[in-house]
Amino acid sequence: MKSLQQYSIPYTGLKLGVHDFEFEVTDEFFSKFEYSLVKSGKLKVKLDLEKQETMMILNFYISGEMMLGCDVCLADYPYQVEIEERQIAKFTGNANLEEDTEEIIVLTKNESEINVAPLIYEYINLAVPYINRCADEGNTKWCDQEMIEKLRQLSGGTKEENESGDPRWEALKNIKK
């Protein structure tokens, strides 16, 4: 994670109040994470860090475009995202006193900066849809027409053949109880 040092924010010198930070997320960022769902993209991250006496509230606004692979035609296509997330970082005096949870990151007094790269990575990957499909399957410039045609050929016939039914089933329908 040393190469993601640009995503570290030294919070010890910050005054109480809201501080704004901006980051660029590119292909180089995704290459630092070995098993990332996203391999390519160009996103902007706006981070509002509100420093208080006992904690920091981090509000992330992530927008941009990432390239995803279509689950149907296997071609890459652009996917637009608009993400808003919030994370709380709590200051504590003793490292053994508390542990991180999903909602709260615990920062000890030995720490002087927070690296937001893992949070950005997590929020972007959570925005990836469960099923990736081109926006207009078969009709976009991104969709692989050759692959769609091959899938249609291998799917077991035309619509007319599927609607008329399999003749073997028709013979079974004539059997009476």
Image (cartoon, rainbow, N blue to C red):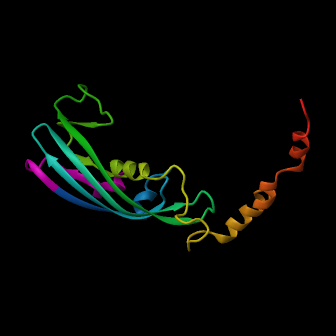
Q: x%, y% of residue 22? A: 24, 61
Query: At which x and y percent is residue 131?
Result: 54, 52
Residue 155 sits above or below residue 106 on the image: below
Quadrant of the rendered structure where residue 138 is?
bottom right
Q: Check if residue 159 falls in the magenta segment.
A: no
From which residue to which does the magenta span run? 1-19
Which residue appears at 28% of the width and 58% of the height? 6
* Image quadrant assignment for residue 24: bottom left
Q: How far across and down, in percent of the image, does residue 4 sit?
A: 34, 55
Q: Is residue 177 left or right of residue 29?
A: right
- Quadrant (top left, top right, bottom left, bottom right) of the C terminus: top right
Query: Which residue occupies 24% across, 47% down?
Result: 114
Residue 82 x %, y %: 35, 58
Q: Is residue 108 left or right of residue 76?
A: left
Q: How many marks?
A: 0
- Whether residue 26 appears in this view of the structure is no
**Quadrant of residue 70 within the rendered picture:** bottom right
